[in-house]
Image (tube, grey):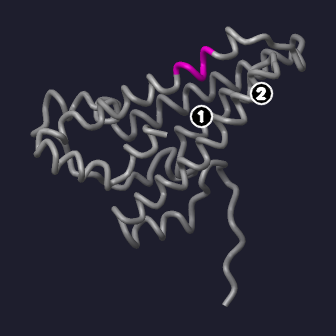
Amino acid sequence: MAHSLLASLRAKAQARRWFGPTADRWFRLLYNFIAVVTLLPVLILPVILIDKEIYSIPMPWTLILFAGQALAVVILIVGLKQTGISAFAGIRQLFAPENVDPPKLVTGGLYRYMRHPLYTAGLLFIWLIPVMTWNLLAINLGLTAYIIIGAHFEERKLQREFGEAYRAYKQKTPMLIPFLRRPAAEG
């Protein structure tokens, strides 16, 4: 929850009011730190709670799922490279704030096919695990809901930030699933 609240433009503006321009240098790094810290308990739960297997995909089908997970990792890495890994992590802002470019709308590469390739990668990875347990299912459902809700919040932020350019991009580019087009609006 704290992670989602920090993602808003309002939170960033409030940090600037409280801490001055220095807040811009630390904001993204702190945001990522809070995201990791708040996610850790969720990831630890399946290990410490009593669990029961729902299914286990046998070989050779497991290899297909692992290939899908490898694809998810590639999508994640390519998507991060397109948006700038050091800026995404908050490192560039911290150590070279003078070299930080103003935000720009990325619509090429993977972003030509889907608006949120990093979220798509995450969803692919968690749902292509070959052994599913009840705890893992609950976590995957929660993470899926969190990602979809977070994507909607991020979209509102991007529309405020980039205006008509983002609205046009949103009309022609699917949110998470490449090549899934919306029907054209009538009228």
Label 1 packing within 10 angstroms: few (<14), some (14-19), many (20+): many
Q: Are marks 1 and 2 in contact (CB under 8 Å)?
A: no
Q: How many marks?
A: 2
Task: Quarter of the image for the C terminus: give it.
Answer: bottom right
- Amino acid type at mark 2: Leu
Residue that appears at 29% across and 35% down: 87
The residue under label 2 is: 137
Between marks 1 and 2 in the image, the one whose residue lies nearer the viewer: 2
Label 2 packing within 10 angstroms: few (<14), some (14-19), many (20+): some
**Vertical relation: 112 (above or below) 19:** below
Q: Principal SS element in the magenta part?
A: helix
> Is residue 67 left or right of 111 when viewed as pictured?
right
Nearest the viewer among 7 and 108 is 7
Q: Is residue 42 magenta?
A: yes
> Is residue 14 left or right of 4 when viewed as pictured?
left
| Highlighted range, magenta | 40-44
**Helix or strand or loop: what does disc 2 sit on?**
helix
- Amino acid type at mark 1: Ala
Where is residue 59, by image quadrant?
top right
CA distance for labels 1 and 2: 18 Å
**Vertical relation: 43 (above or below) 74:** above
Q: Is residue 8 magenta?
A: no
x and y, in percent, of residue 66 in the image: 72, 18
The residue under label 1 is: 121
x and y, in percent, of residue 184 in the image: 68, 76
Residue that appears at 37% across and 41% down: 83
> Is residue 57 left or right of 126 when viewed as pictured?
right
